[in-house]
């Protein structure tokens, strides 16, 4: 396998641009003053990312994981984070042994 100089430079350029866009977000986010709908949109980003990461795994691995994800989602409305994680882990373990 060989790598020509053009391809290597393109990869390096893409890596540099990706790195700078991520770092720029950190610097710009501190200077933004958000109110109203913009603040609500930014506050919705972490749960949306979490659901986007968890949902495909929970829904494609089996019934035990899908049911445990539902139980954990319900628990998340009532319990703090550590309690929610504990309920989720226990639900997966119990359901995997039952199903």
Image (cartoon, rainbow, N blue to C red):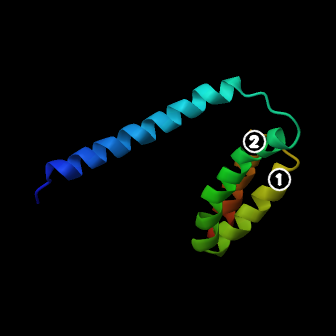
Residue lying furthest left: 2
On screen, residue 93 versus residue 3, left or right, reads right
The residue under the point 54% across, 31% down is 24
User: Mark 1 packing: few (<14 Cα in 10 Å), some, or many (20+)?
Assistant: some
On screen, residue 37 versus residue 13, left or right, reads right
The residue under the point 24% across, 44% down is 9
In the picture of the structure, the residue carrying the numbered disc 2 is 42
Residue at mark 1 to residue at mark 2: CA–CA distance = 24 Å
In what element is the residue under mark 1?
helix
Q: Which mark is residue 75?
A: 1
Q: Position of residue 92 (x, y in %)?
A: 66, 61
Q: Which mark is residue 93?
A: none
Question: Foreground residue, 39 or 64?
Answer: 39
Mark sitting earlier along the chain (1/2): 2
User: Mark 2 packing: few (<14 Cα in 10 Å), some, or many (20+)?
Assistant: few
In what element is the residue under mark 2?
helix
Q: Position of residue 96 (x, y in %)?
A: 62, 68
């Amino acid at each position: 396998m060989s790598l020509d100089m053009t391809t290597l430079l393109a990869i390096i350029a893409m890596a540099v641009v990706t790195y700078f866009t991520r770092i720029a977000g950190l610097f710009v986010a501190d200077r933004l003053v958000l109110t109203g709908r913009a603040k609500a949109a930014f506050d919705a980003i972490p749960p949306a990312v979490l659901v986007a990461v968890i949902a495909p795994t929970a829904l494609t691995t089996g019934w035990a994981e899908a049911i445990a994800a539902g139980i954990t989602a319900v628990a998340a409305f009532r319990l703090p984070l550590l309690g929610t994680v504990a309920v989720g882990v226990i639900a997966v373990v119990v359901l995997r042994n039952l199903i």
